[in-house]
Image: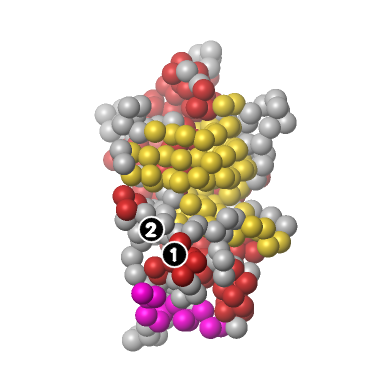
Amino acid sequence: MTGDTAKAIELTGLRVGFGPVQVVDGVDLSLERGESLALIGESGSGKSVTLRAILRLFPEGRSRIEGGVRVVGRDVLALSKRELVDFRGRVVSMIFQEPLLAFDPVYTVGRQITEAILRHEAIGAQAARKRALDLFERVRIPSPARRLDNYPHEMSGGMRQRAMIALALACRPQVLLADEPTTALDATVQIQILLLLRELQRDLGLSIVLVTHDLGAAVEVADRIAVMYAGKVVEIGTARQIVREPHHPYTIGLLRSRADGVLVKGQRLETIPGNPPDLSARPPGCPFAPRCFLAEDACRMEMPAAAAIAPGHVVACRRADDAAAAFRGGTAAALDTAVPA
């Protein structure tokens, strides 16, 4: 399959481990050209690790990546170190979670962006700075010419995040990975960043993978949503299917835990009972079974295979139909009952 006809991303049986701990455990995901996919789930579910595995950012010898990772037709796990340098930035780029830490504090933001361009492309310094200025204008940084000469600490959080997006786009990648791009930003700036990502995807034809805890953010940006739990994808579908027709008890729990609408003082927020599993001592069956309001003995014995319940909608749950019925009937509040023994 050539790079022109290949999917933007294909993950097959992806497993990522650190020592005895398997953090990502058999993830199968694909991303079409020009499509956006959101990975959602609690902290520790393997979302960010999955993104970093696509770029092979983990140190060799202290981590292991197994399975298949292909980006626009290229086998990422087979790339040499020299090939990786060209691959990162030109083929796939990443917006990191905290831009203040991602930028070098001793150089101006403009210099860091122009150096990235010069590293990958045979153009002059003046042309590279012109592109950096164009990118600042595209991501709507005010007074872009002046801001190019700012150090990271001289920018606000929202402005740094826009600068990080400009850096990620500097070498015109085909795939953009966004790891919690709105973390620590106020609500108004979060919305602006999400709208910007959607606009850039449309205008530049980008393929985007967004990692987020926020279902609202996922719906705003993504065509499809994949729900991760304990290093596995437990449900995937279109944004509408996941939000309107969830079939996994964990997805339902995430939806019920949202603080939508106007909160009343003293009103109790629904939560998912229990705690995420210890990945160093995985339970033998479905990892969500100890917290699931529908779990039965078979769930605790064996991980169910993923099955399609509608075109493009796949779920890994023995009780998927019962969970969907509970959600439709409004009885998913049973999530608030005692955790099964």
Task: Please state which of residues 337 and 209 is positioned toward the viewer in this rendering.
Answer: 337
- Quarter where residue 320 is shown: bottom right
Q: Nearer the viewer, residue 155 or 214?
A: 214
Question: Which dot marks residue 125?
Answer: none
Q: Can the viewer see residue 87?
A: yes
The residue that disc 2 covers is: 283
Look at 51% across and 69% down and name the residue there.
Answer: 249
The earlier-in-sequence mark between 2 and 1 is 2
Q: Position of residue 52 (x, y in %)?
A: 43, 38
Q: From the viewer's perspective, is residue 131 above or below residue 39?
A: above
Viewed as shown, does residue 13 lie left or right of 72?
Answer: left
Question: Do residues under tags 2 and 1 come within 8 Å of each other at their CB atoms?
Answer: yes
In the rendered image, which quarter contains the C terminus?
A: bottom left
Indicate the quadrant where residue 243 lies: bottom right
Amino acid type at image mark 2: Pro
Query: Which percent across, then down, holds residue 257?
Result: 44, 72
**Nearer to us in this view, 13 or 8:** 13
Tell me the element at label 2: loop
Give the image location of residue 248, x and y in percent. Answer: 55, 66
Magenta-colored stretch includes residue 169:
no
Residue name at image x 48 percent, y 52 percent: 232
Q: Is residue 177 visible?
A: no
Task: Say which amino acid is labelled 1.
Answer: Arg
Q: Is residue 187 above or below residue 5?
A: below
In the image, which residues are magenta?
A: 330-341
The correct choice, above or below, for 289 with respect to 55 in the image is below
Quadrant in which the N terminus is drawn: top right
- 101, above or below 197, in the image: above
Measuring 60% from the left and 37% from the top, which residue is drawn there?
9
Residue 300: numbered disc: 1
**Residue 146 horizontal/vertical position (percent):** 40, 34
Give the spatial CA distance, label 2 vs label 1. 7 Å
